[in-house]
Amino acid sequence: MCFAALFGCARYSPVAPRASESPSARVRIERLTNIVQSFWLSARFERVVRGVRLKEAVIARATTAPCRFGWAAQRGSLVRVGRVTVDSDARELLPGDELLLVFGPEVGARLDQVVRLDLVLERAGREECVAIPLTGDAAELAWNREGKWSAELPMGGRGYTRPVGALVGDLDARVMVGHRLDDVRVFAGVGVGAGFCRQSTCPPEVVDAGTDEERRTPRVSATFPLSLGFQAMPWQFGYFAFGSALEYEAMFTRLETYSGKRSSWIHGVTLAPRLALTYPDPWAPGLPGGWNNGFVALEFTAGAAHAPSLGGDVGLRLGGRVWVSMPVD
């Protein structure tokens, strides 16, 4: 579900037990999942007497009277031993039943206020109310972000201040896995791209041969970068975050030179300051937000590169890239 959302998906669990009860039932909130502007809420019926049914489930402002007014869920389901009933009011409740509620963007926008979950229960023609605080600034109303893994998708190019391993520039796209360690995220991955070889080492490619538009361009070879590094964005203002990534890279390429095909490895370190578009932090009272919920960033990359083969060249690489990050667990 989170991976399908691509951007802005995060799962949360309460820091402290979040439960309330009526004479006929006790209900505990287990998880909240934010998916872009919508959210999913999971609650468990820990105690239920016979004959109780769920009549209504709404999100309401904490300042209003319980079970008087609120915003209804788009969809509600009851899960019992792995089986789902789409209509959550279609049967009698039992201990252990899980209630799944889906709220749309119009309700998700209300989470920046202090709100609660109101459940209206019915038994023998009489109504009961179970009101559970959902968000708030108090320590006991805080939430923990559960997921630590993310997919990292950078794509961009660089030019070399001098040829390194016979290359004068490269373009690539990478697929990496990130793991959150408090305020820092480590990442590692692989990619594929194109490297542009200098004409003194590789025969140039001739375009539009025999015409007035004939021109020579650097010969292109496939590149396969391997990356390992860490990233952090300690400064955030509203929807924008600022930070950097530090990355070690080893890149393999096979060049078609004047003397035949030759393999080459280029390795180096890159520093990439960035500006990212992300979620506010917190995105609701007690709910952490920010770049760990996903982001799209523009980076300026600068670093040193060294090629042990093909002359042992050392040079600088300057460029830019777009970096997309999304939670996957």
Image (cartoon, rainbow, N blue to C red):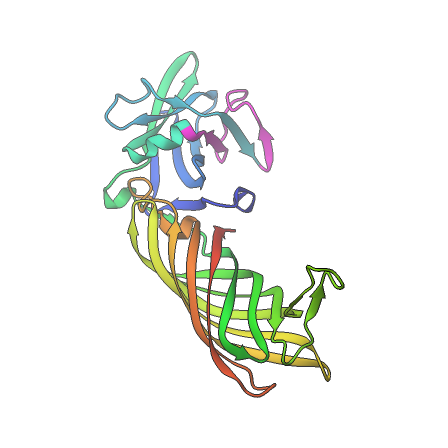
Q: Which percent across, then down, holds residue 166?
A: 59, 79
Can see residue 183? no
| Magenta stretch: includes residue 284 | no
Place residue 42 in its image quadrant.
top left
What range of the chain is rendered magenta? 81-105
The answer to whether residue 273 is left or right of residue 315 is left
Q: Which percent across, then down, holds residue 8?
A: 45, 44
**In the picture, which quadrant includes the N terminus?**
top right
Q: Which percent across, then down, holds residue 272?
A: 41, 65
Can see residue 252? yes
Q: Nearer the viewer, residue 181 or 156?
A: 156
| Image position of 62 with respect to 318: above or below | above
Q: Nearer the viewer, residue 85 or 300?
A: 300
Q: Residue, x 32% and y 39% (percent of image)?
A: 284
| Image position of 160 with respect to 102: above or below | below
The answer to whether residue 238 is left or right of residue 3 is left
Q: Nearer the viewer, residue 246 or 216?
A: 216
Q: Which percent across, then down, holds residue 69?
A: 33, 18
Residue that extends furthest to the bottom in the rendered view of this protein: 311
Residue that extends furthest to the right in the rendered view of this protein: 210
Residue that extends furthest to the front in the rendered view of this protein: 212
Place residue 105 in its image quadrant.
top left
Q: Magenta span: helix, strand or loop, mainly?
A: loop
